[in-house]
Amino acid sequence: MAIAFMQMVVEPGKEKEIKEKLMHLDYLSCKVEEAYMTYGEFDVVIKVTSDSVENINHFVMKVREVEGIKRTVTSLVYGTLC
């Protein structure tokens, strides 16, 4: 299983709308497991899982097309502490 965290800067006032849109974004085998509105440098953070890193790559490209998202930073998980 592949896991990634995406942090996003969005247009002011669109945080909730974008979070909700991403929670229901169905693309390839990717699933948004968690989504949060946050304070600080980023406005929205999501956790994405998939059966492959390649599918996560395609998912990231799809998310970047969502209107209102200005910038993203993606962290691909390569191991766990458990």
Image (cartoon, helix red, strand yellow):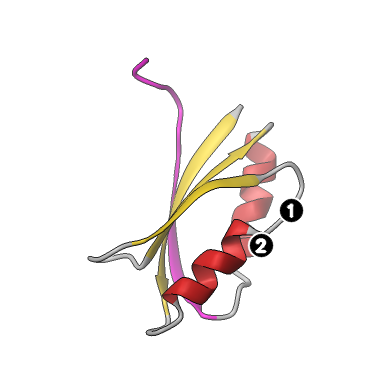
Relative height, residue 71 to residue 51 (above, below): below
Q: Are marks 2 and 1 in contact (CB under 8 Å)?
A: yes
- The image quadrant that residue 23 belongs to is bottom right
Nearest the camera: 76 or 22?
A: 22
Q: Is residue 60 left or right of residue 45?
A: right
Instruction: Specify the amino acid type for callout 1.
Output: Tyr
Query: Furthest residue to the right?
Result: 28
Residue located 50% across and 42% down the image? 4
Q: Which of labels 2 and 1 is toward the front?
A: 1
Instruction: Identify the disc placed on residue 67.
Output: none
**How far across and down, in percent of the image, does residue 12 sit?**
37, 84
**How far across and down, in percent of the image, does residue 8 sit?**
42, 64
Residue located 66% across and 59% down the image? 24
Badge 1: few (under 14), some or many (20 or more) residues near its Cα, within 10 Å?
some
**How far across and down, in percent of the image, does residue 28 sit?**
77, 47
Looking at the rendered structure, the secondary structure element under dot 2 is helix
Residue located 46% across and 73% down the image? 16
Q: Mark 2 or 1 closer to N-term?
A: 1
Instruction: Specify the amino acid type for callout 2.
Output: Lys
Which residue is label 1 attached to?
27
Residue located 44% across and 70% down the image? 71
- The image quadrant that residue 54 belongs to is top right
Which residue is label 2 attached to?
62
The number of callouts visible is: 2
In which quadrant of the rendered image does the C terminus lie? top left
Is 60 magenta? The answer is no
Q: CA distance from mark 2 to mark 1?
A: 8 Å
Nearest the camera: 29 or 70?
A: 29
Nearest the camera: 19 or 56?
A: 19
Is 72 magenta? The answer is yes
Q: Which residues are magenta?
A: 68-82
Relative height, residue 20 to residue 26 (above, below): below
